[in-house]
Image (cartoon, grey):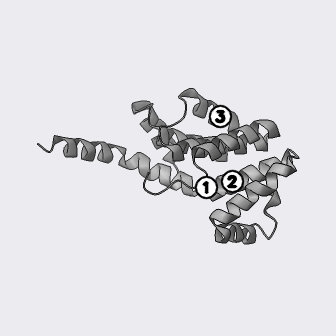
């Protein structure tokens, strides 16, 4: 009796370092060595979608977009819709940065289908705009504003009033 609780606690303690590193990377404030911690955790548990996403994010922010894309494609998407949306959104951002607007639209649409958040819808509207699919851009942007007008306004203000050249970061829920 209670073994299932002990097993979950043991798994959580084993992942504590990796989860802390993943959280810092996802928030944009990694410490030296966080990427190595994530690589070690992924070696131990290659099916850990959260660690894989955090490591891909660290690589993308470090300028290794090819490594980030390969890492995300290696094991397939995570089981949770939020992770799938975050993975697809990151891939869409990478494709957009490389000038592959069509591929970016596909990834952002996949993210929208998995978990439509304000950031995902806003980023999809940006991709539609760059692909000159203006008939789809306006309704997608309106859908993002309908979800959370304040988030769009805060992002717009942080971007100097012109978010047209930027993408909103997709934040993972803290419950993950």
In the image, residue 138 lies at what x, y percent?
80, 57
Secondary structure at badge 3 equals helix
- Furthest-top residue in view? 74
Where the N terminus falls, by quadrant? Answer: top left
What distance separates the C-alpha of mark 2 from that of mark 1?
A: 6 Å
Left or right: where 86 falls relative to 106? left
Residue at mark 3: 69
Residue 11 found in image quarter: top left
Query: Can the viewer see residue 53?
Result: yes
Secondary structure at badge 1 equals loop
Report how many numbered discs are placed on residues in the image.
Answer: 3
Residue at mark 2: 121
Residue at mark 1: 117
Q: Nearer the viewer, mark 2 or mark 3?
A: 2
Circle 3/circle 1 CB separation < 8 Å: no
- Residue visible at 59% across and 40% down in the picture: 56
Q: Nearer the viewer, residue 168 or 150?
A: 150
Residue 102 found in image quarter: top right
- Residue visible at 47% across and 50% down in the picture: 21
């Amino acid at each position: 009796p209670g073994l299932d609780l002990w097993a979950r606690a043991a798994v959580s303690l084993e992942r504590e370092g990796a989860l802390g590193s993943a959280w810092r990377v996802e928030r944009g404030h990694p410490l030296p060595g966080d990427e190595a911690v994530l690589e070690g955790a992924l070696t131990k548990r290659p099916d850990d979608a959260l660690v894989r996403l955090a490591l891909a994010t660290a690589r993308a922010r470090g300028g290794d977009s090819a490594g980030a894309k390969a890492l995300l494609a290696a094991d397939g998407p995570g089981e949770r819709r939020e992770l799938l949306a975050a993975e697809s959104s990151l891939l869409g951002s990478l494709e957009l940065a490389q000038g592959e607007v069509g591929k970016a639209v596909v990834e952002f649409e996949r993210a929208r289908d998995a978990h439509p958040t304000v950031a995902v819808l806003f980023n999809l509207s940006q991709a539609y705009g760059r692909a000159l699919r203006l008939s789809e851009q306006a309704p997608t942007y309106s859908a993002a504003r309908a979800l959370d007008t304040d988030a769009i306004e805060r992002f717009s203000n942080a971007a100097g009033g012109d978010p047209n050249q930027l993408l909103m970061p997709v934040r993972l829920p803290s419950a993950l």
